[in-house]
Image (cartoon, coloured by chain):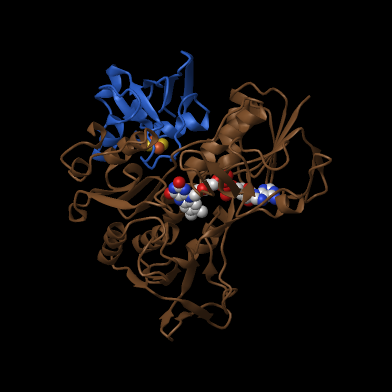
Chain colours: A blue, B brown
Amino acid sequence: MPGVVFIEPGGGRHAVAAPVGVTLMEAARQHGVEGILAQCGGAGACATCHVYVDPAWFDRLPPAEELETGMLETAWEPRANSRLSCQVTLTADLDGLTVTVPARQR
Amino acid sequence: MTTMVIIGGGQAGSQAIDTLRREGFAGRLVLIGEEPWLPYQRPPLSKKYLAGEFALERLPFRHRAFYDEHRVELRLGRRAERLEAAERRVTLDDGEIIAYDRLLLCLGAEPRRLACPGAQLSGVHALRSIADVERIRPDLRPGARLVVVGGGYIGLETAATARQMGCEVTVLETADRLMNRVVAPETSAYFAAEHGRHGISIVCGARVERFEGSARVDGVVCAGGERHPADAVIVGVGALPVTRLAQDAGLACDNGITVDEYCATSDPAIFAAGDCANHPSPHYGVRVRLESVDNAFEQAKAAALNMLDRRTVHDRVPWFWSDQFDNKLLICGLSQGHDRRVLRGEPAGRAFSVCYLRNGELIALEAVNHGKDYMAARKLILGRLRPDLGRLADPGIELRDL
Ligand SMILES: Cc1cc2nc3c(=O)[nH]c(=O)nc-3n(C[C@H](O)[C@H](O)[C@H](O)COP(=O)(O)OP(=O)(O)OC[C@H]3O[C@@H](n4cnc5c(N)ncnc54)[C@H](O)[C@@H]3O)c2cc1C
Ligand code: FES
């Protein structure tokens, strides 16, 4: 199971392991990672699962589709390395991925 | 030690647990849920979970370990039978009595049933829970004829999913257009065309009179006599708030359990949130009962804070989404009472939105495949924007720049 690290808004590191095939959002939500609200459960309809991806990893993720890009533009403080964590599916080569949860989701 | 009890382990109940513990509640916390599952999300039930593309393990919000870590006493598969508000205690179906200091009712809603003849036949389904999906799924074999009664979002999502599973699908809607209570005619027309394009037969103005069949349903007959052959039927004609427990306990109820802006019922020790709660919307100045993930989530959060004596008003611009085929319908705000509608973009382009105004103020927006307009509108509605109508109608101008 790939392991992923979430840097929570308070600065804490929350490491979780999750099976291949689930999304980064699901991995966070199952373990109650602080600040990932994920209200729509991955439908790409809420932008409350926003994360900043460690730049070293950003380019290794499949790029965002148009709907995601549109949602991110108006999310809370988007950056160049912003993603919706529900649109990132865990694969074996994402083991070690680190993302930062923004201070707010909206 | 203070005891907080939550009845109803759905979207709202699970959020309340999260908030209570995150905000430092250290006392006894009990969750009573009639369904045997850990609290789970319902939206996939008419979408990917129904299609079998989403495993059962992915439905719950949290693992069991989360509840253990946060010292939540789970009473799952157990129904709260009786609430005695004066004694502050709840009796479960197995006789267990639990006393509380603060109680939160997150009882949800239940599908409205049709009273017409044959509604009890086997093969006539409702769709609300995992158990319902387990009953429905075996009926959705390729080639099976499915009649969906109700052209609201649950009916249409189910129709789309069943079609993708290879069923022959007919949707019967009483009104003259689809989703007539929640979307504009342009949006209804767009979705009717999308469903038609995928081979679904949409019949508007159809009033179901009876279901036919001996043991199992084999047809649906409408007023006027038209008969639609059916191997299975899914009835999606709205939901009613679950209030019996509250009503029997003497709590005020009127289309839901009546709560104030602090989520408190007529008994100050009892709160309610989610689909079962009828509450004021300060932003819109009306009372509403909403059936949406967003409302369940936010109201439960506010209720939990109020249970901790952290006075918090539940005041939100609500939002909602629906997935049908590869279309995403995104709605924010309440359009009731609008006096003007403005279309942004062209439905033919497969991405457009409809803005609703009242006295010049933007009060709601529905977006089809347009996340940007939708996200921008959430902020603009909250800020009570009074947009220039010409600019609003120009899809070349970003909504957030208005
Ligand atoms: C098929 C389907 C698709 C949906 N899709 C969307 C969507 O795309 N977007 C969206 O925003 N919303 C959607 N919704 C609506 C959303 O799921 C609900 O608004 C939300 O689940 C409400 O949460 P709740 O906690 O109020 O109620 P629920 O999630 O229904 O939970 C209530 C729980 O309380 C339990 N309960 C009731 N009485 C008792 C008792 N006496 N004792 C113990 N337990 C009890 C019930 O069994 C139930 O488990 C959908 C709903 C359905 C059914
Ligand atoms: S969970 Fe809603 S957009 Fe990701």
Looking at this view, name the residue that lies furthest to the top: A11
Q: Which residue is rendered at x = 57% and y = 29% of the image? A: B312
Quarter holding the N terminus of chain A?
top left
Of residues B37 and B391, the one nearer the viewer is B391
Looking at this view, name the residue that lies furthest to the front: B359
Where residue B287 sits: x, y (%)? 54, 47
Whether residue B141 is visible: yes
Q: Which residue is rendered at x = 33% and y = 48% of the image? A: B356
Where residue B260 sits: x, y (%)? 61, 40
Whether residue B54 is visible: no
Q: Is residue B8 above or below residue B198?
A: above
Q: Is residue A94 above or below residue B6?
A: above
Looking at this view, name the residue that lies furthest to the left: B396
Quarter holding the C terminus of chain A?
top left
Q: Going by the image, does B60 lie left or right of B266? A: left
Q: Which residue is rendered at x = 36% and y = 56% of the image? A: B183
Residue B38 found in image quarter:
top right
Residue B391 found in image quarter:
top left
Q: How many marks?
A: 0
Q: Is residue B65 above or below residue B124?
A: above
Where residue B88 sits: x, y (%)? 80, 39
Q: Is residue B230 above or below residue B260?
A: below
Where residue B231 sits: x, y (%)? 46, 75
Q: Going by the image, does B74 lie left or right of A35? A: right
Q: Which residue is rendered at x = 32% and y = 60% of the image? A: B188
Q: Going by the image, does B58 lie left or right of B105? A: left
